[in-house]
Amino acid sequence: MHGTILCMEDDPAVAALIDRELGDRGFDITTVSTGEDGLFSIVTSTPDPILCDVSLPSMTRRVPCLPQ
């Protein structure tokens, strides 16, 4: 394994593409479809990188980047 990537994406087709392409390269992918679930995953699982859709419903573009 190369590490865990958190994919915050609400489009199922895009999320599936990311999961398939990066999963095939040895990454463990955690996919969430809402900003709230993404923030919960950041706190509970400490992913390595985070791929974040900048237009997630109910989230502003800067919220995932704010310090705790």
Image: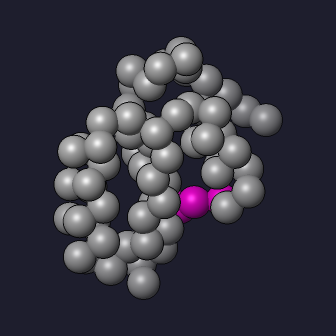
Q: Nearer the viewer, residue 49 or 55?
A: 55
Task: Report whether 31 appears left or right of 19.
Answer: right
Q: Residue 11: horizontal and vertical position, in percent?
A: 30, 36
Q: Residue furthest bottom?
A: 1
Q: What residue do we see at 30% from left, 72% from top? A: 23
Q: Residue 45: horizontal and vertical position, in percent?
A: 67, 61
Q: Quadrant of the C terminus?
A: top right
Count of marks placed on residues: 0
- Above or below residue 56? Residue 14 is below
Q: Residue furthest front?
A: 12
Judge whether residue 29 can be spotted in this image: yes
Task: Report whether 22 appears left or right of 60.
Answer: left
Task: Report whether 61 appears left or right of 66.
Answer: left
Q: Main secondary structure of the magenta part?
A: loop
Q: Picture quarter containing residue 16?
A: bottom left
Residue 12 magenta-highlighted: no
Q: Residue 61: horizontal and vertical position, in percent?
A: 49, 19
Q: Nearer the viewer, residue 61 or 37?
A: 37
- Above or below residue 32? Residue 53 is above
Q: What residue do we see at 49% from left, 68% from top? A: 4
- Above or below residue 29? Residue 34 is above
Residues shaded magenta: 46-50
Image colouring = one colour
Q: What residue do we see at 43% from left, 72% from top? A: 28
Q: Residue furthest right?
A: 68
Q: What residue do we see at 39% from left, 21% from top? A: 55
Q: Nearer the viewer, residue 27 or 31?
A: 31
Judge whether residue 49 can be spotted in this image: no
Q: Quadrant of the N terminus?
A: bottom left
Q: Residue 60: horizontal and vertical position, in percent?
A: 53, 15
